[in-house]
Image (cartoon, grey):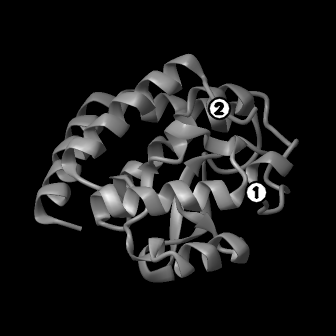
Amino acid sequence: MTPAKRALDLLLVLLAGLLLALPLLAIALWVRLTSPGPALYWSQRVGRNNRIFAMPKFRSMRIDTPQVATPLLKRLTPIGSFLRRSSLDELPQLWNILTGEMSFVGPRPALHNQQDLTALRTHHGVHRLMPGLTGWAQINGRDELPIDQKVALDAWYLQHRSLALDLRILVHTALKVLQRDGVSH
């Protein structure tokens, strides 16, 4: 990661933290009041150079849900569908950006048990990138993409990455989230 990209990440995460502190607390309380269990769910994810790290999300599923890919899940909490459609469940990952385990833009981190995705990313060199809150694959299909297409988009990003492209991806992500385009329910 370049120093400029890290500086942009830190600036954006600090601004987001200031603007979202109260909404983050409200969402955490809402999760706790509508279903048993903790407000945050910590998922083991594959990070840069295939290192495993813990990634938080607001819990949108019941506490007895197994760790499998998103399209296979049907065990949402009463507010889980809203959290996923609005992508609010992703906001705790600002912590990972602050700690340097993630960036705002990069390939979405794979679940620790998605060996096929991890192997294909490694084959294409994508594993060298810092995982992101959003990425080129997310604005070009998100959860609807088959693994080979997702990795092809991640590899394209690896070859073309720049601060200008990152800003473009961030703008497109905001538009997609507002339109609820490509989000698993």
Q: The C terminus lies in which quarter of the figure?
A: top right
Q: Which mark is residue 30?
A: none
Q: Position of residue 24 (x, y in %)?
A: 44, 34
Q: Which residue is mark 1?
A: 69
Q: Residue at x 77, y 63 (%)?
A: 67
* Dot 1: element: loop
Tell me the residue at 13%/55% (across/down). Answer: 7
Image point (28%, 44%), residue name? 165
- Point out residue 110 in the picture as x, y percentages from the top left corner: 60, 65
Left or right, 174 with respect to 166, comes to right
Quarter residue 159 falls in:
bottom left
**Position in image of residue 94 (x %, y %):** 37, 49
Of residues 52 and 182, the one drawn nearer to the viewer in this rendering: 182
| Residue at the disc numbered 2 | 182
- Front position in the image: 106 or 73: 106
User: Which quadrant of the view contains residue 64?
Assistant: bottom right
Label 1 neighbour load within 10 Å: few <14, some 14-19, many 20+ = few
- Residue at the image point whose x is 70% and y is 77% from the top: 115
